[in-house]
Amino acid sequence: MKNFDVILVGGGFLGLSTAYHLSKAGSRVLVLDKGDLGGGTSSACSGRAQVCEGYLDPLNLMLIKEGIKRHETLEEELGMSYDWKRFGLFLIIRTEELWKRWEERCEILTKAGIPTEMVARAELEKAEPAMNTAGLLGAAYSLEGLLNPLLFTRAYAQAAERCGATILSHAKVTGMDVEGGRVRAVRTEQDTYGADTVAVMAGAWTPTVTRLAGVETPVRHTHAEALVTEPIPEIIHNTIELADFYEIIHGKQQAVAIGFGPVPNGTLVITEAVTMTDKLHAGVSHWGLSHLAVEIVKLFPCLAKTRVMRSWGRPTSFTPDEEPIIGWMPQVQNLFTATSMVETITAVPLVSEWMAMMIRGESPPVDMGRYSPARFSGGWSWHS
């Protein structure tokens, strides 16, 4: 049996970035993924490094600010471009109540070093002249980040391998041998591997994996759908999203809340049609794509005859309190779990380094206790 210091289950952003930092620090690391690297939710995202839509607590604000800063030099560190750039975001606002709420958010974000401002309808029309602004009060504006998620995944994978990590795709974990309160071995369909530590970073699939060690992880998911258009002329100049995006989709059996923006090849990536389901799959529905098309044409009528080139669907995980899970599972001594980040792309450069320190038995520079899975050890209940 081959032995490793750490086995990471999940070859997405969190797993590969943590593998990089672990192997860079000298740990013998194995990454296992049941499909292609980044083939789950990581590769299906829009590539946004969000800065103004998450929680406003000091830890999350610090993660956003410092995470964006790390991205400015990360391509050089990893030795590969992932098409990083800063890009404008308009969060469009339709109601006075939402306008007031975002005025307050803008003040908090700006004071925290994340400049965000309110933009009146006239200014929005100047910035996006092709937009139908009827019924809009204006928008909140911020400068966020944008990258190619496939290249981002590959950059971390190649950097980890250069540091000595072993990365295996199409290596589905089928079992874990637990003895004396510790995972002693991880089994795949092809082989069995020993490890001092096992870290599960498999997104919505995390509960499926941790159950192999007899541990239930309080993670659920929604199924999100998106589409990509044919290349179009440069008529949209920023990322556009509804300011109440998350409120629209939260707790609904089915909902559509659009967010979209151009990418370097000239296409539009348009999200998101959401379904509450217990099934983990990668399909799309006729209702989701058609409703996405209707909503975007309302805002940009000039796109009415634009062709859809491809679409996808992926599960997006969340926890009962909608905060991430990062830390040691209390039921099994050497089982570490990380999932359900809100601003994943933004925070990855920082959080992955801290998780690597935690896995190696070192103390990160910031207390991560609020994200510990131990907070659910007394049971959990789901928000409606």
Image: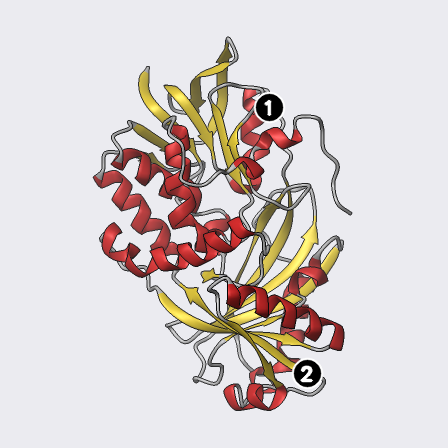
Q: Which residue is at the front of the view, 145 or 131?
A: 145
x and y, in percent, of residue 309 in the image: 49, 69
* Badge 2 or badge 1: first in the primary sequence: 2
Q: Which residue is at the front of the view, 275 or 307?
A: 275
Assess disc 1: are there few (<14), some (14-19) or many (≥20) residues with their C-alpha within 10 Å of its C-alpha: some
Q: Does 113 sit above or below residue 336?
A: below
Helix, strand or loop status at disc 1: loop
Total count of labels: 2
- Report whether 181 appears left or right of 363: right
Confirm whether residue 193 shows in the render: no
Confirm whether residue 354 shows in the render: yes
Residue at figure coordinates x 46%, y 60% from the top left: 49
Q: Does 34 sit above or below residue 180?
A: below
x and y, in percent, of residue 271 in the image: 58, 64
x and y, in percent, of residue 258 in the image: 62, 69
Q: Does 100 sit above or below residue 135?
A: above
Residue at figure coordinates x 67%, y 66% from the top left: 244
Q: Which residue is mark 1?
A: 215
Pointers 2 and 1 in contact (C-beta within 8 Å): no
Q: Quadrant of residue 25?
A: top left
**Direction front: furthest residue:** 111
* The disc label shown at residue 137, or none: 2
Helix, strand or loop status at disc 2: loop
Residue at figure coordinates x 32%, y 50% from the top left: 154
- Report whether 114 appears left or right of 82: right
Residue at figure coordinates x 33%, y 15% from the top left: 1
Assess disc 2: are there few (<14), some (14-19) or many (≥20) residues with their C-alpha within 10 Å of its C-alpha: some
Q: Amino acid at mark 1?
A: Val
Q: Which residue is at the front of the view, 50 or 199?
A: 50
Q: Amino acid at mark 2?
A: Leu
| Alpha-carbon span between mark 2 and mark 1 | 48 Å
